[in-house]
Image (cartoon, rainbow, N blue to C red):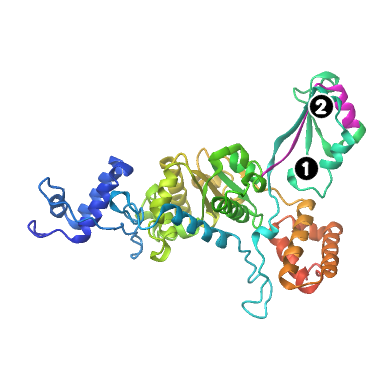
Amino acid sequence: MNADASPPSNLAAELHSLQTLRNVLGEEMYNQGLTRLRAQYGDAAVDALLAPSATPPEPAASRQDIRNDAPNQGAQGIFYGDVYLYGQRGKDAAALLAGYLERQLQDCDRLSLQGVYEQKAADDVLQISLEQVYTQLAVAELADRETFTGAALEQFAAAAYLQAHRAAEHLPGAQRDRCIVQGGAAARRMDAELPEYRLESLAPDDLARLARDCDRLSFQGPRLVTEAIVASRRLVLLGEPGSGKSTALRYLALTLAQAGLDEAVDRAAHLEGWDRLGDAGRLLPIFLPLLRFARRFVNPADHLCGADDLWNYIAAELEAGGRYEGLAATVHEELEQGRVLLMLDGLDEVAGDESRRQAVRAVQAFGERYPQCRIVVTCRVRAYVGEPNRAWQLPGWPTATLADWTLGQMQHFVQAWYAAATAVSGMAPARRDDRIEALQRAITLRDDLKRLGVRPLLLTIMALVHFNDGQLPEERVGL
């Protein structure tokens, strides 16, 4: 390029955006941006604009391109949405975020049933929302619950406690799995530092005797999925196919979006354990599939993914189709302040070893770039656990594995399903109640249905078939 020629206008705009964001990016990323501009436009053109005597470029609302057009090319530069001079944006930040949360409500509350059962027409499907049928999920580990000491231990009612926490119809939050005794004769009878007893093996008289003979009686129950997410700023949520990984994150995004739009929504009432975060629980939810991110890099060997690439993907999704200008910049401010919960779904769906390593590298780098951001990644158990999968594990990130559904969760879902389905179909209440009783009884009595029902997805399909046909196949092949 001739040194006397005028620099291209798009270079001036890009350089001005880069300089405006210099304090946000830091020197290292700022210099990387300069290197990219030099490679694209030439040293002479860049130096002409950087020279002290050069006339500053005319301010313009501009953004850096996410260059997705050419295959095998990674995203270049950093995309912060439309960056306006003097701190002004095209839309008020609160209005941008409110619009975004409204879209999250619509997207995450849809229960996709299309294609899981034969329909007569494309629109012949029940319009049931996730919020109507969501059933409490637990992970395969225990959490501390009630502890009784002193006067409370003396007044402990063993029979009432077992009835309230051991029945099969209870949801995980109400279930108790074991008790731990400390001090007294009960603890000395077992050769263990903290003797444990399974509640399923204790009669009321046995539990009452333990309470009389110890100084401290503690109970543990299933840890709920939201409690596991609250406990770790970084988490890999594992589960079998159809176990509810995506559903758990969509419900979390849905509830946080509701709370972000309405101060009256009590997050802790819908998200167990969320109260531990206090005001820090006011998080902006971002729910995105990792598969779409991986597809941005057709040939992963040509580009090493990092934090910039993942942010570029997030920003592009936020301002999809050129709409919602300024939203990415607004969200980035929330991200830097630690007010974002990033939920990345389906690491196992990223095909190819190298592509999966690239995705993991980007997520890990993003977590290091934004240490205050809470991040949850979902993956199937067999695609993550064990030595063969070590190359795409997130170093230092704790894991939590979704537990199979219990009979109580199955019964609760059936009740919620028919309440929602009949509300949109006009089924008579008496017929609805008969259907609920019939399906709950079948699941309780038939081992084949119970084995299928431990997976929320399969139970949803069973409920849809039962709603349409009034019964489930009796023979194994039909089922």
Which amino acid type corresponds to the residue marked 1 in the rendered image? Gln
Q: In the orientation shown, which residue stands out farthest toward the right?
A: 205
The quadrant where residue 272 appears: top right
Choose between 127 and 464: the one closer to the eye.
Answer: 127
Q: Which residue is mark 2?
A: 152
**Residue type at the position of mark 2:** Ala
Q: Looking at the image, which residue sits at the far left? A: 4
Confirm whether residue 351 shows in the render.
no
Residue 329 at x, y percent in the picture: 38, 52
Left or right placement of residue 298 versus residue 135 in this view: left
Residue 358 visible in the shown view = yes
Tell me which residue sits at (45%, 42%) in the image.
Answer: 367
Q: Residue at x 65, y 68 (%)?
A: 113
Q: How much space separates mark 2 and mark 1, taking CA atoms?
A: 20 Å
Earlier residue among tags 2 and 1: 2
Q: Position of residue 58 (x, y in %)?
A: 19, 56
Query: How busy is the neighbourhood of tag 1: few (under 14 within 10 Å), some, or many (20 plus)?
Result: many
Residue 383 horizontal/vertical position (percent): 57, 51
- Please identify the quadrant where the C terminus is shown: bottom right
Q: In the image, is 408 to the left or to the right of 379?
A: right
Q: Which residue is mark 1?
A: 175
Does 145 sit above or below residue 11? above
Residue 150 lies in the magenta stretch: no
Q: Which residues are magenta?
A: 206-224
